[in-house]
Image (cartoon, grey):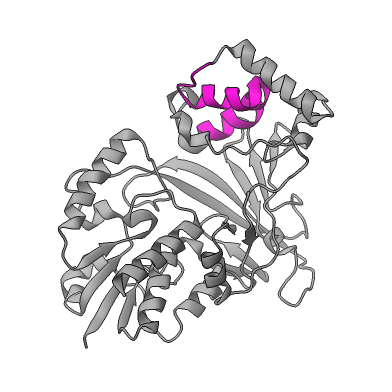
Amino acid sequence: MKYDYLVVGSGLFGAVFAREATNAGKKVLVVDKRANVAGNVYTEKMEGINVHIYGAHIFHTNNKEVWDYVGKYATFNRFTNSPVANYKGELYSLPFNMYTFNKMWGVVTPEEAAAKIEEQKKEAGITEPKNLEEQAISLVGTDIYEKLIKGYTEKQWGRPCTELPAFIIKRLPVRLTFDNNYFNALYQGIPVGGYTKMVENMLEGIEVRLNIDYLENKEELDALADKVIYTGPIDAYFDYQLGNLEYRSVRFETEVLDKPNFQGNAAVNYTDNESPYTRIIEHKWFEFGKDEEGNDLPKTVISKEYSSEWKLGDEPYYPVNDEKNGNLYQQYKALAEKEEKVIFGGRLGEYKYYDMDQVIASALDLCKKEL
């Protein structure tokens, strides 16, 4: 049996490529080492709730082509991401907006809020931010940095803010309006029925083999296809011969609670240093607390997220895109370019901190070149 393409990994990148290649008349085999499709966007039903097993995934994009594309495989609800920050029991609106500034300083007008930020920035005397701490203070002032950024960020990255690069929070949304929508995206929502269903729809009619570790069966799998689309970690492909790229990993503690409502919001960030977790996700609020028939759900499922340093064997989540890892990735990329029949793609294959829409856009770009 001969395939045109072997696609390694059934996450968004692999699923989009497999679909488009099949539509173009190519013969495709998809393999995944997990027992399920959908990669890190995998959702699983518990108590009628679509639980995001590998952390919260909220689809948001300004790219109409990508939005129209996912719309072929799922109907999206109108979920708007409005996280809440909990600092030692004080609750604040995220992203930073007029509700946040009013609660923090008692200011009422945008002018007063802007003046307060400016005053704290001046006091700190930062002209050229050299690290994340200085960058944050120059954007939102000292109070908000201390209460809502410092503890959360240090837990997330496992390093002091003074050792983190400034660019990490260049995109920090700061609004002098009462707008609670975290993303500045035109299109936003969650697939009705969960992400797994969406990916299964993409892979309909395509041969998928699960529980298959490509790297352990590389020779025999490579022999089946003319070309390989590889979406796993690029350094693992080369057996870490130049050393391993670094990631941050996340550990989840998920529990079913015998109550209809735990925190009243999909995401609550714990921004103090004392809480060991970075945030708690209450999955039912991604779908307004209802099942697909519109019934209220009597129970709830929560996941506490703990950020950790990645080690071999852990699930890699966020590439640590600093200078050292950037240089190492360039060396692996040079090796990858010499692989005649293998194309590397996706967050792990390209060692990029991609959002979901960027993964899909990248896969569609590859399809245009390749097919």
Q: Nearer the viewer, residue 165 or 174?
A: 174
Determine if residue 64 is in view: yes
For the N terminus, give its image quadrant: bottom left
Q: Position of residue 184 (x, y in %)?
A: 63, 49
Q: Is residue 206 magenta?
A: no
Q: Nearer the viewer, residue 303 or 29?
A: 29
Q: Position of residue 338 (x, y in %)?
A: 15, 58
**Position above or below: 51 against 92:** below
Q: Position of residue 113 (x, y in %)?
A: 76, 26
Q: Is residue 326 left or right of residue 269?
A: left
Q: What is the quadrant of residue 109 in the picture?
A: top right
**Position above or below: 151 against 344:** above
- Residue at (72, 25) in percent of width and height: 114
**Position above or below: 30 against 179:** below
Residue bounds of the magenta highlight: 127-154
Q: Position of residue 99 (x, y in %)?
A: 78, 36
Q: Nearer the viewer, residue 138 or 9?
A: 138
- Residue at (38, 51) in percent of width and height: 314
For the C terminus, give its image quadrant: bottom left
Q: Is residue 107 left or right of residue 272?
A: right
Determine if residue 238 is in view: no
Which SS type dominates the magenta stretch?
helix
Q: Is residue 130 left or right of residue 83?
A: left
- Residue at (63, 47) in percent of width and height: 280
